[in-house]
Structure formats: C-alpha cells, structure tokens
C-alpha cells in the first residue's frame, strides 16, 4: 500500500512545485527570472514581484536524482576544478547550458537503454530469476533506464524547428530541477561562503547578465557590531536601487513589509517544526527536515510557505498525540547529524542508522534558515548569522544547545569535501562536544553532491564505531 502523505507535506511539495512552475511560465511570457544564493535576503526580490530560482536547491535536487556526478564532470570538462563545491560545479555546468539527458536514437526516436540499469527480475514467488546464458540475475525491464549523457541547451535551441530539436528537448531529464530557466540576473550574498562570490561572478560573466552582490563579512564576535550593520544596510539600499534599474519599477514598501511578515512567519513555523525533534521518541527524523528545506530556501518570503509549515505543525502535533512517527524502526539512539547530507547517497546514509536503531533527532543545517527579526537592523543582523559566517564560539554554542534540547547520545559529523568552510573547523568542534557534553562523535568523509567522494564501507564502519561508543557511554 502506498505510504500516506500528510496534508502538511502535500502542501509543502505544492509550494516548491509552484515556485518552479511560476518561474518557467514567467520566462515563457518574457519576464525576468533571477537566480539567487539561498541566504540572499529574498524579501528584496519579493518587493519587486520577481521570479527567483535557487541554484543550491536545484543542485541538491539534481544530486538527489543521481545526476550530480555527470554534471560535476561537465563542469570539470569546462575547466572548473574538481575541488570546487559540488553545488557550484553543478550550477556552473547548468549555467553554461549543459543538461543531463536521456540518450536517444534520433532515427527511431527511442531512448537507448543502459543494460546495467534496473533491478533484478523476480518470479511470482519473489525469487530472483537467473539468466541461464550468463548465470547472472536477469533485469526487470520495467525498471531499466536509458543511459544519461550531457547535452547542450544552446546547441539544441540553435537547431531549426523540427523532429531533432523536439526529441532532444524532450530527452532532457524530466524532473523540475533539470528544467529551470536560464537566468536574466543573479543575486548573491556571501554570508554562506566566499565560494559563492566566485560562483555567481562566473555565472554573470558566462551569461552576460547583472550581478547584485551583498557582502557580509565574517563575524569574529558573537554580537554583530554596528559598523557591520551600517555597511550591510548600505548594500541593501544599493541592491534596491539596482533592482529598480533592472525592473524599471519603484521599490514597493508595502510588498517588502508583507514579504518580511511572511518570511518571519515561515521562519517561526519552521523553527517550531524543527523543535518537534526534541520529543522522545521523535515523531519524525532529521531526514524529513532535510526534505522540507526546499521550502524555506525557495519560498520563505511567501505566505503559502508559512501556511504549509503551520499545517505541518498540526500533522506533527497529531503524530505526538497518536504516538506515531515517520521513523520506520524503534528509536534506540538519538544523534545529531552535522553538516549537509550526501544527497546522492541518502539511502546509503539511512541504511546503517536503521540497522542500529539510530534516529537523527538533531541537525544543524535546517534551523540555520530560521531568520527571525523585528526591524530592518535586526533583519541585517539575522542575515549575518549563517553557519559559516559566525565565530567558532557561536557555532559551538548553537550546536551544543541543539544537542542538549534534542537529547542526543552522539554526533555524526559529515566531513563534506564540497563544503570546506564548514568541515574545516569540525575537528575542534568534535573535541568540544565530547568535552562539554560527554558524548561520542564520529566523522565520515563524503560530499553533498558528488558521489565520487563517498565511501559506503567507511561510513558503515564509522556508524558502527559510534554505536559502540554510545553503548559504552550508556553503561
Ligand atoms: S556553504 Fe559550502 S555547500 Fe554552500 S556553497 Fe559554500 S562551499 Fe558550497
């Protein structure tokens, strides 16, 4: 029987689908479509009714659909280094016109099936059917997929109207993240990291489009000082001026105020949703939170996102009352998952956790999008508080607070090859967690988007080690 999807989850899925569909429609109608970094103040673009896409969310989706490697390779073939963040490589390849496509035979119009794809064929008793000729399991033809190759949208668009153009357009992978419109402008805020700056400069240069940049300096102190606020406020004003020039419209104060109201309502509902992980056992897991991040990234300034998260809160309240959970195993241990997940390897991440009864009941990545503020200056300060732009004291404090409130027994740290600013200080953080909280930590190597950097055997061993340490700690 198909798993029942709750009303909140359905509403959240619709919000993101609508953001993507609206941007495609806007492009068709000749309206501007922008690309924005995830922690650029979306309230500014909302004040101009602009359609905006979020390359980080897009790249996560492409990686989760297993096209991260081919897109990263396409970027490397364009000359971008393999050491650059995987999200950036996927996005740069896409901005250059590269698309993951199903291989097609242009004569027959049929997709070319990869014989290595697909699941084993099973007989009516559920036994795997063996091919007598090869002695290997036969593949279930229904699950076999075409080869995935890289095509070029600029090349396709330059073709005359006709069969080849139609076939090649249709062959581009059909999921929404592989079909976002090319950008007419880019909005970049480096509160996340400085890779972002170079990434967006490159998109602007490749596509010959304007870049609106907000520079947020690294915070060496816990408080954001007044000089920083003045410096960033002036850039917000400048961004508004640039958006006026770009759109030919005057800044609409009412629309801006509304967007701020919606963004705060979304952030507050999102943080309350995150807090449901504090229940023991938890009604859901950090993996569910990861799945809902698309909404806070792409739609936090929209009332529909706020309403959908409020609906999700009701679902969780009901789950608490009824004692249900989305976690398909009894919760024996609770851990914090540190960092961005390996999107192409989510099932592999989940498997050993499930086998050992380990529920992820705390994550750092998700609540980092809860920007709450009451004034313009507070808004500026809120956008200074991204995980990679705060000092280590603040970073430790945040995480230890989450670990205590969410009652974790250990911490699983993703040393993410893509995200060097995040991974760089994790060794010291691990040391501090164990010293301050008395809980074990284990780290594994991986990557948020490029599956070549993840080793399943190493991950399983590290999870096993963490479980043994949590067991010993409990005794
Ligand atoms: S913060 Fe990390 S994951 Fe995000 S863009 Fe920067 S390097 Fe990539």
Image: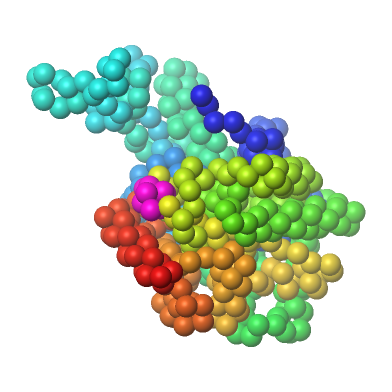
Position of the C terminus, as image quadrant, is bottom left
Q: How is the image coloured?
A: rainbow
Most foreground residue, 286 or 29: 286
The percent position of residue 313, horizontal first and vertical second, equals 72, 47
Most foreground residue, 14 or 379: 14
Going by the image, does 372 lie left or right of 407?
right
Going by the image, does 465 lie left or right of 440?
left
Most foreground residue, 349 or 85: 349
Q: Based on the picture, tell me whether residue 352 belongs to the magenta stretch.
A: yes
Going by the image, does 229 lie left or right of 93?
right
On screen, residue 146 above or below 8: above
Q: Quadrant of residue 364?
A: bottom right
Q: How many marks?
A: 0
The percent position of residue 134, horizontal first and vertical second, equals 10, 24
Q: Residue at x 32, y 60 (%)?
A: 464
Segment tinted magenta in the rendering: 348-356
Q: Residue at x 40, y 33 (%)?
A: 101
The percent position of residue 325, horizontal first and vertical second, equals 58, 44
Q: Residue at x 39, y 65 (%)?
A: 471
């Amino acid at each position: 029987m198909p798993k029942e999807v709750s009303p909140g989850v359905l509403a959240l899925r619709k919000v993101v689908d609508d953001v993507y569909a609206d941007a495609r429609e806007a492009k068709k109608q000749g309206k501007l479509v922008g690309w924005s970094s995830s922690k650029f103040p979306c309230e500014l673009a909302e004040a101009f009714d602009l359609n905006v896409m979020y390359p980080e969310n897009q790249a996560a989706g492409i990686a989760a659909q297993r096209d991260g490697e081919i897109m990263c390779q396409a970027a490397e073939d364009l000359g971008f280094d393999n050491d650059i963040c995987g999200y950036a490589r996927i996005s740069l390849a896409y901005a250059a016109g590269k698309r993951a496509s199903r291989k097609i035979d242009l004569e027959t119009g049929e997709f070319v099936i990869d014989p290595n794809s697909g699941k084993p064929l099973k007989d009516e008793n559920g036994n795997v059917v063996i091919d007598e000729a090869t002695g290997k399991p036969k593949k279930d033809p229904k699950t076999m997929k075409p080869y995935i190759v890289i095509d070029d949208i600029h090349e396709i668009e330059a073709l005359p109207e006709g069969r080849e153009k139609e076939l090649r357009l249709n062959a581009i992978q059909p999921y929404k993240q592989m079909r976002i419109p090319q950008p007419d402008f880019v909005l970049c805020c480096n509160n996340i990291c400085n890779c972002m700056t170079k990434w967006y400069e490159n998109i602007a240069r490749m596509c010959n489009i304007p870049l609106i940049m907000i520079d947020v300096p690294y915070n060496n102190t816990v408080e954001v000082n007044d000089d920083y606020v003045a410096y960033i406020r002036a850039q917000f004003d400048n961004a508004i001026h640039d958006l006026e020039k770009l759109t030919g419209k005057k800044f609409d104060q009412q629309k801006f105020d509304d967007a701020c109201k919606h963004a705060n309502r979304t952030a507050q509902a999102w943080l309350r949703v995150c807090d449901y992980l504090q229940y023991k056992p938890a009604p859901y897991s950090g993996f569910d939170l990861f799945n809902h991040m698309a909404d806070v990234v792409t739609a936090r300034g929209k009332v529909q996102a706020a309403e959908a998260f409020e609906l999700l809160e009701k679902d969780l309240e009901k789950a608490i009352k009824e004692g249900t959970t989305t976690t398909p195993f009894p919760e024996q241990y609770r851990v914090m998952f540190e960092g961005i997940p390996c999107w192409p390897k989510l099932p592999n991440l989940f498997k050993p956790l499930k086998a050992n009864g380990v529920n992820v009941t705390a994550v750092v990545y998700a609540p980092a999008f809860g920007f709450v503020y009451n004034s313009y200056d507070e808004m500026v300060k809120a956008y200074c508080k991204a995980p990679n732009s705060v000092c280590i004291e603040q970073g430790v404090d945040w995480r230890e607070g989450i670990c205590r409130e969410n009652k974790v027994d250990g911490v699983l740290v993703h040393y993410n090859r893509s995200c060097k600013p995040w991974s760089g200080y994790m060794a010291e953080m691990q040391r501090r967690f164990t010293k301050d909280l008395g809980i074990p930590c284990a780290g594994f190597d991986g990557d948020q988007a490029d599956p070549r950097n993840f080793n399943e055997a190493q991950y399983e061993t590290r999870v096993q080690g963490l479980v043994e340490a949590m067991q010993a700690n409990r005794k």
